[in-house]
Amino acid sequence: MTIGYKTILAHHDSTERAGRRLQAASRLAASFEAHLIAVYGVMSPLYSEPFVADGGAFVAQELLRFQERKDAEARTAFERLAPTLACPVEWRAAVGDPATVVNEHGRYADLIVLGQYDDDQPNDVTPDFVGRVIMGSGRPVLVIPYAGEFPTIGERPMVAWNASREAARAVASALPLLRRASEVQVTTFDPKPGRGGRSAPAGTQGAEIAAYLARQNVKATVSASGTPDVDIGSQILSRAAEARADLIVMGGYGHSRAYEFVMGGATRTLLESMTVPVLFAH
């Protein structure tokens, strides 16, 4: 049984958004008396820039100097911020692909905190970074939007439920937050077909998830979403706004990432357009 979060890992980088992300993670860690770890992963430019070989040693040296300055600035920003956080924080840094670094360190944490990718601002990670951590870490991933302030996370959560394996993992992973929430809203969407090719009726799945949560000491209000002409991701965002939710809990990548890249999907919609933090589990 999930009792609480005892280790929380937050991704740190050299962007201005890293500070807000770490502050949010520290508030969660403090509330659970959890150990907080900040992980900084950097891909050496010598591995990521194919033109280095053509530019010779001078280009390679300049790229390394640039990366060293960037790394030093990130560490300095962290050291300035650390004393102001709600709890102590451990610093870790590793050379390597950031998603791989976070996945490897995150497997020893109960919750991973990442930031939403911002197409309009400089980033230290690639656009698929969050998706790779959701798919590869084996841990629940809390994604903080790049825009907005979030003084509370989980006081008024909304669960997006479709009876899928991923949704079940997300709910189980979010139980520490759901148990202490002042109000939990569950919105049911089209259930995933079972092995026999049939889905449970919407009313049945709503009653089942409500009963499960009640046995976990979570009192939830359940409602169904009935707008089939609107994509699921947009429905989730709309219902969360109506509920004034400060957290969305949902399964991540019920379809493959390749499918969502081509065809779209709820996870992709939320990662691109989230307005509140989202806890994903795959």
Image (spheres, helix red, strand yellow):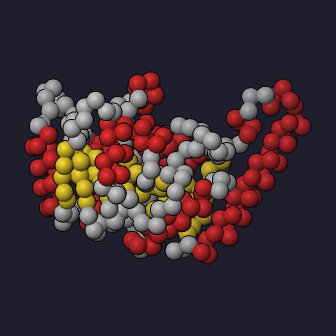
Question: Which of the 4 image quadrants contains residue 194?
Answer: top left
The percent position of residue 158, horizontal first and vertical second, equals 30, 54
The percent position of residue 257, horizontal first and vertical second, equals 43, 31
Left or right: 29 in relation to 93: left
Of 8 and 144, nearer the camera is: 144
Q: What count of labels does the image hold? A: 0
Residue drawn at x 25%, y 31% is 228
Q: Farthest residue to the front: give it.
A: 242
Do we see residue 115 in this rendering?
no
Quadrant showing the N terminus:
bottom left
Of 181 and 258, nearer the camera is: 181
Do we see residue 8 in this rendering?
yes
Left or right: 199 in relation to 183: left
Quadrant showing the C terminus:
top left
Of 83 and 91, nearer the camera is: 83
Residue drawn at x 74%, y 52% is 70
Q: Is residue 227 above or below residue 38?
A: above
Q: Is residue 147 above or below residue 63?
A: below
Residue drawn at x 71%, y 42% is 44
Residue drawn at x 89%, y 37% is 58
Left or right: 191 in relation to 135: left
